[in-house]
Image (spheres, helix red, strand yellow):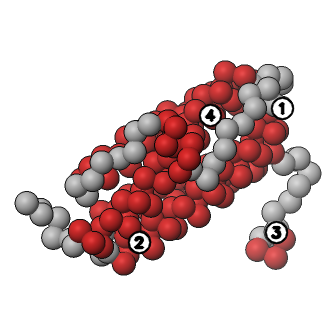
Amino acid sequence: MNYLNMQDEKILPVVVELNTLLSDYNIYYQKLRSFHWNVLGKNFFDLHEKFEDMYNEAKLKVDEIAERILTLRHHPVSKFSDYLKMSSLTEAASMITDHEMVDELLNDHKTMLAQMSQVLKKAEEAEDEGTMDLIGAYIRELEKTSWMLNAWSKSTSDQLKKETTNS
């Protein structure tokens, strides 16, 4: 029974893009775990806690994306070997500096935001409001996390764009 009132041929491209995003999030999740375990230095307490918050959030998204794929009446990719093949993200060395970890994550965010845009494009074409709603919220949240990590990586003497501020 098709309880979604959506055409299967329109949904399949959405599922393909969601499975790619699911793969991205699984690689990202594991990278965050590794960084959480291996961060060293004066920023240990801040980043150890932040990475834990981030991997817990990523874990929830992995489940939500897989459940969305199931809602669309398809099976989510579930083998790590497939995640490595499908994802645009790559594994990272665990013994890197805190600043390299943050740079790595910001690069991943850029890639993941591009993939989310692909999901949105296919969902719009399929008139899949549920997926659009889900991914729209993910974009907003990942952009905010990116801003925070980027701010952390700056010097206190760095400035925002002056043409947009009143001070």
What is the distance, in whole Å, between disc 3 and disc 2 at their CAs? 34 Å
Q: Earlier in the sequence, mark 4 or mark 1?
A: 4
Q: Earlier in the sequence, mark 3 or mark 2?
A: 2
Q: Residues within 10 Å of mark 4 (few under 14, many from 20)?
A: many
Q: In front: 144, or 63? A: 63
The single residue placed furthest to the left in the displayed view is: 1
Q: Looking at the picture, which amino acid does disc 4 mark?
A: Leu
- 151 left or right, relative to 31: right
Residue identifier under label 2: 122
| Disc ID at residue 32 | 4
Residue 36 drawn at (x, y percent): 65, 26
Q: Secondary structure at mark 1?
A: loop
Examine the image and state in which quarter residue 27 appears: top right
Q: Looking at the picture, which amino acid does disc 1 mark?
A: Thr
User: Looking at the image, is mark 3 or mark 2 nearer the viewer?
Assistant: 2
Count of residue discs: 4
Quadrant of the rendering where the C terminus is positioned:
bottom right
What is the distance, in whole Å, between disc 1 and disc 3 at their CAs? 28 Å
